[in-house]
Image: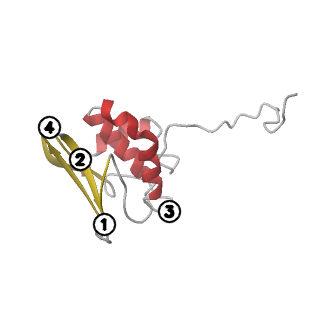
């Protein structure tokens, strides 16, 4: 069984991932379990900005990473999602249910729930301006 362990000590925040093989890795963020690849991909793309983020922004990053991990055509909601945090001045806290809803509402306003890939930061160019996007200019 894999496990993610978060802690905070005099040296700052820590996230550890344990693997069934017995290996333990310290990381900036991780996703484990079935359908976790899109979450890991999101975290890999954005982890460098985490040091500048406040708690609310980090919660939003966690939710954006989770969006792509929901099975099938389902959407992340207060019944199937939760976020936990711990930090300087913050006891270990799990946000779920009604406590998570304001963050989910913000995520929807920011457009993070529609794509299903968890990225939430890029839009496709769907305009049909008649130009051939594959044409080369010489």
Specify few, some or many for label 3: CA neighbours under 10 Å numbering under 14, 14-19, or 20 or more: few
Specify few, some or many for label 2: CA neighbours under 10 Å numbering under 14, 14-19, or 20 or more: some
Where is residue 73 shown, x and y percent of the image?
Answer: 51, 59
Q: Is residue 27 left or right of residue 73?
A: left
Residue on which disc 2 sits: 14
Q: Is residue 33 above or below residue 62?
A: below
What is the CA distance from the residue labelled 3 to the residue labelled 4? 37 Å
What is the CA distance from the residue labelled 4 to the residue labelled 1? 26 Å
What residue is shown at x 18% (from left), y 49% (from top)? 7
Where is residue 1 shown, x and y percent of the image?
Answer: 29, 71
Q: Quadrant of residue 124?
A: top right
**Dot 3: element:** loop
What is the CA distance from the residue labelled 1 to the residue labelled 3? 23 Å
Residue on which disc 1 sits: 2
What is the CA distance from the residue labelled 2 to the residue labelled 3? 32 Å
Residue on which disc 4 sits: 88
Where is residue 10 shown, x and y percent of the image?
Answer: 12, 39
| Pointers 2 and 4 in contact (C-beta within 8 Å) | no
């Amino acid at each position: 069984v894999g496990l993610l362990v978060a802690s905070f000590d005099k040296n700052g925040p820590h996230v550890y991932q344990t693997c069934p093989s017995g290996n333990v890795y310290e990381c900036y963020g991780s996703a484990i379990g079935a359908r976790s690849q899109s979450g890991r991909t999101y975290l890999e793309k954005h982890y460098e900005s985490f040091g500048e983020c406040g708690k609310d922004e980090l919660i939003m990053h966690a939710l954006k990473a989770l969006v792509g991990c929901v099975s099938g055509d389902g959407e992340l909601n207060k019944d199937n999602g939760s976020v936990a945090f711990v930090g300087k001045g913050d006891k270990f806290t799990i946000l779920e249910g009604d406590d998570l809803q304001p963050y989910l509402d913000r995520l929807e306003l920011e457009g993070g729930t529609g794509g299903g890939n968890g990225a939430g930061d890029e839009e496709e160019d769907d305009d049909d301006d008649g130009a051939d996007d594959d044409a080369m200019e010489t």
